[in-house]
Amino acid sequence: MDRCSFDVEGKNIHFAVEGSTGGTSFGLHLAADAIANNGRVLWASSDLPDGTRFSQLFAHLSLVESSQFHAMNFGGKFERAIDAMVEAAVGLPSVKLVVLDDWCDNTGRIPSNLVSEVKRLADETGSEITILLLSKGSADASGSSDDPIVARGDKAMTDAGYETWKMWRKKEGGHRIIKTGDAALEVEIKDSGFHF
């Protein structure tokens, strides 16, 4: 099986995942790809990625390459975290990917002030930088979707300039479905990342 290569360059993606299916691993997979292509990655979350999982997904990169991964904590006001991300994205050379992991609460409506802030992030970092927002999706209570999960705040996020991608379990084990617009990919999560 080949390691997946995702077409994300210059896109703003709101990635809604079924709980505990590998959203952070997906972000790390894209981060390793960006760094392998001579880019720099900015990562923000309330918790840093698991060290073991980070090591697995970055195993093919040198220590020098891995130093192009810059992590920060969301601690404090979200607006200040966005300020710091914008400043770093504009000020550091070769930033290709900005990831906000678990950037909003896991349930309920996404507050409009957070949507405004991630819109500002997209507007102020430019079109060459990919932005990936990782959040928990929710079950489709309305029955109007063919997918088992829906992205919370889908319309507001689309209006803010983000594509909606989703991921859920296909069956037991590491098999997942990643839906990018109308396309659905079946993938398997392995130690080294996502594979077709």
Image (cartoon, rainbow, N blue to C red):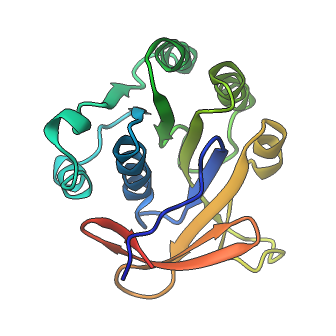
Q: Nearer the viewer, residue 31 or 179?
A: 31
Q: Nearer the viewer, residue 122 or 36?
A: 36
Image quarter of the C terminus: bottom left
Q: Residue at x 18, y 51 (%)?
A: 55
Q: Tell whether 74 sits left or right of 113.
A: left
Residue 22 quadrant: bottom left
Q: Position of residue 176 (x, y in %)?
A: 48, 77
Residue 156 quadrant: top right
Q: Residue at x 78, y 35 (%)?
A: 160
Q: Nearer the viewer, residue 141 or 39?
A: 39
Q: Report if residue 134 is visible in the image.
A: yes
Q: Report if residue 152 is visible in the image.
A: no
Q: Is residue 79 above or below residue 189?
A: above
Q: Residue at x 36, y 26 (%)?
A: 73
Q: How many marks?
A: 0
Q: Tell whether 7 sits left or right of 59.
A: right
Q: Nearer the viewer, residue 69 or 119?
A: 69
Q: Position of residue 1 (x, y in %)?
A: 36, 83
Q: Position of residue 181 (x, y in %)?
A: 74, 65
- Residue located farthest toward the front when viewing the structure as drawn: 38
Q: Position of residue 16 (x, y in %)?
A: 60, 57
Q: Is residue 53 above or below residue 93?
A: below
Q: Tell whether 189 sits left or right of 81.
A: left
Q: Tell whether 76 sits left or right of 182.
A: left
Q: Is residue 17 above or below residue 132?
A: below
Q: Residue at x 47, y 28 (%)?
A: 95
